[in-house]
Image: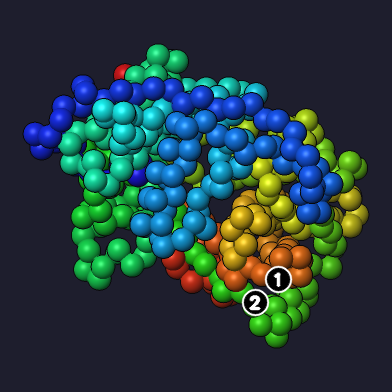
Amino acid sequence: MADKEPLQPSGAPAPGALAITRVAVPPAEPRHGEPVPGTGTPPAAVVPVPDFAACQAMREEHELALWGNLDRCLTLAEALEYWRGTGYEERHLFLARLNGQPVGLCSVTLPLRENTATAGIDVLVDPPCRRRGYGRALLEHAESLARGRGRTSLDAYHEVPLALVQPGSVMVPAKSGAGGLPLNDLATAFAMAAGYELEQVERSSMLALPVPPDLLAGLEADALAKAGDYELIGWDEECPADLVAGYAELKARMSEDVPTAGLDWEREAWDPARVRQEEQVMVRSGVQSVVAAALHRDTRELVGYTVLNWRPAVPASIAQQDTLVTGEHRGHRLGMLIKLANLRRAQARWPVARSILTWNASENQHMLAINTALGFKPAGYEGEWQKRLG
């Protein structure tokens, strides 16, 4: 939840004066010209309607005010592709106007194959228009849609930069038992007043690039001593056909193995078709990916993987996505090895990048330890909120 305003109006124009309308998302159209580097496939045309452009501008303004950069913000091409939705998730974006001027937005995401009792909720109000009750009106609009679709569990998140967590801050503890958010953060107060509970806190971390080669070599030598039964492989953008079924199974395992505290999230059903659909969405969004994976020598089974994404529109930043080693193959330093391999590939492919961002549940001490050894430093916190209805 990015609203960051209290729930009580202050006597300014009533929330009822808002006009909240669904934002139309134009369908993808082929764009002639240069292909996406490394893929040979052109991205979707970036032709937003005015309401969509207003939402994107508001989101970028928020990210710049919070972080001073757009490293965590969807690019316009990504946002257009995302809000078109997929066969696995329906997505609704709404813009609020007052006297014709944009003042806020809200959104609802509805999983369609699993987690069909849940909905994702987000609210953002333009800073000059806060403290007037518009956030509450937008939240009620989003929650009403979710209720109308039979959803009984709502989830939301928001991020807090490390610089805003002052020494001695009173913290709201996560129900997971690990981590917390500062009580004086206005988004935290907004979520709590609206009936949401802080289920989990993730730590965001940043790694400065390039990483010293001697550090990588030392970590690799130590890890290889325990990984003789495995070999490392990798690919860009598209998983090889002979591995895609195993990759799909790993992605299904990721959805249930990652720590989720008390969030009402179920295992996702992944098959090769879903993997290919996700890959195609990334290409249409203009996102490039490198994947490193661990293969068991005897069974030729994929047992771990990690993903890094890079966007030409935000060239200085790389985003760490999934990292997983299956339970029965842990204890062989595979998590470290696949991260090292992918880090080397990313630095070679995207030498202009100057940092990598990653997120880990506060209770996931093993992965946090790997990231710390690589040189990641804390950058902030992300609260995962949940509200159960009925």
User: Mark 2: which amino acid?
Assistant: Pro
Quadrant containing the C terminus is top left
Q: Residue at the far bottom: name it.
A: 214
The circle drawn on residue 210 is 2
The residue beneath circle 1 is 351
Pinpoint residue 182: horizontal percent, then vertical percent: 26, 57
* 111 sits left or right of 39 in the view: left
Mark 1, other Cα within 10 Å: few <14 / some 14–19 / many ≥20: few
Left or right: residue 283 compared with residue 301? left
Give SS at disc 2: loop
Nearest the eye: 152 or 26: 26
Viewer-closest of 217 and 70? 70
Which numbered marker is on residue 301?
Answer: none
Tell me residue 24's x, y (percent): 51, 24
Q: Is residue 29 visible?
A: yes
Q: Residue 210 versus residue 214: which sits nearer the camera?
A: 210
| Residue shown at the point (39%, 19%) measured from the top left | 145
Quarter placement of the N terminus: top left
